[in-house]
Amino acid sequence: MTLPTREPDRASADTDPRIVLVAGDDTFCHVYRNLAELLDEQRHYDKLDGPVEFFDPTGRQLIPVFSQDWQLVELHPSPRPAAPEILRERFKAVLAHVERFVRERPQVLGDHRIDVEEVLSELPDCDAPNFTDVVDALPWHSHGHRGNLLHNAMHAAGWAR
């Protein structure tokens, strides 16, 4: 019996260090450029309000490694194969949540004199044939960057019922 190799998935993860964070209840997701950015964000800025899961851009789950004081220090690729279609469905659930949240609370957009429909039209197309295109379109965060209206709406809707 020959076990399948994990090299193709590892190679793609090695060339693209981005990390996708998804709330356990599918109300929030974010893309980080790398582990350092994720760790910096959690130490200094946004505190997570619930359980999360991590994935690489191929849809492979990343297993968190914690220090003795329960601080995230590393992420290791799961031995399971990437499951982009499952993650794609989770993205759809997150974006449906954000859309409902913004429609019910348009004030989260602030006084930007922008139509709710215009902001919602920026929601990514989760049905794009190439899964990487879906990941590319998700809200991301850069140190010191306040983000666009969709990014801010994602934060406002995160973990909100």
Image (cartoon, rainbow, N blue to C red):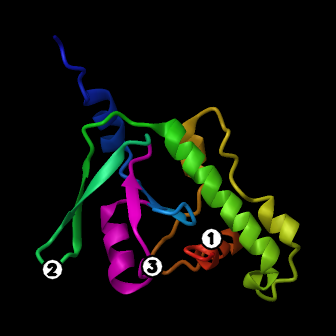
Q: Which residue is drawn at 51% across and 45% down?
A: 87
From the image, which quarter does the N terminus lie in? top left
Mark sitting earlier along the chain (1/2): 2
Using the image as rendered, state which of residue 90 and residue 118 is in the foreground.
90
The mark tally for this picture is: 3
Q: Is residue 50 above or below residue 12?
A: below
Nearest-to-viewer mark from 1 and 2 = 2
Q: Residue 154 carries which label?
A: 1
Q: How packed is label 2: few (under 14 Cα within 10 Å), some, or many (20 or more)?
A: few
Report which quarter residue 42 is drawn in: bottom left
Mark sitting earlier along the chain (3/2): 3
Q: Which residue is drawn at 85% across and 71% down?
A: 116
Mark sitting earlier along the chain (1/3): 3
Q: Which mark is residue 69?
A: 2
Q: How far apart are marks 3 and 2 (CA)?
A: 18 Å
Q: Which residue is drawn at 58% across and 80% down?
A: 146
Q: Where is residue 148 in the image (x, y as percent from the top left)?
A: 66, 72
Q: Position of residue 138 (x, y in %)?
A: 59, 56
Q: What element carries label 3?
A: loop
Q: How packed is label 3: few (under 14 Cα within 10 Å), some, or many (20 or more)?
A: few
Q: Distance between the residues labelled 1 and 3?
A: 14 Å
Q: Distance between the residues labelled 1 and 2?
A: 29 Å
Which segment did they paint magenta?
A: 32-57
Q: Is mark 1 on a helix, strand or loop?
A: helix
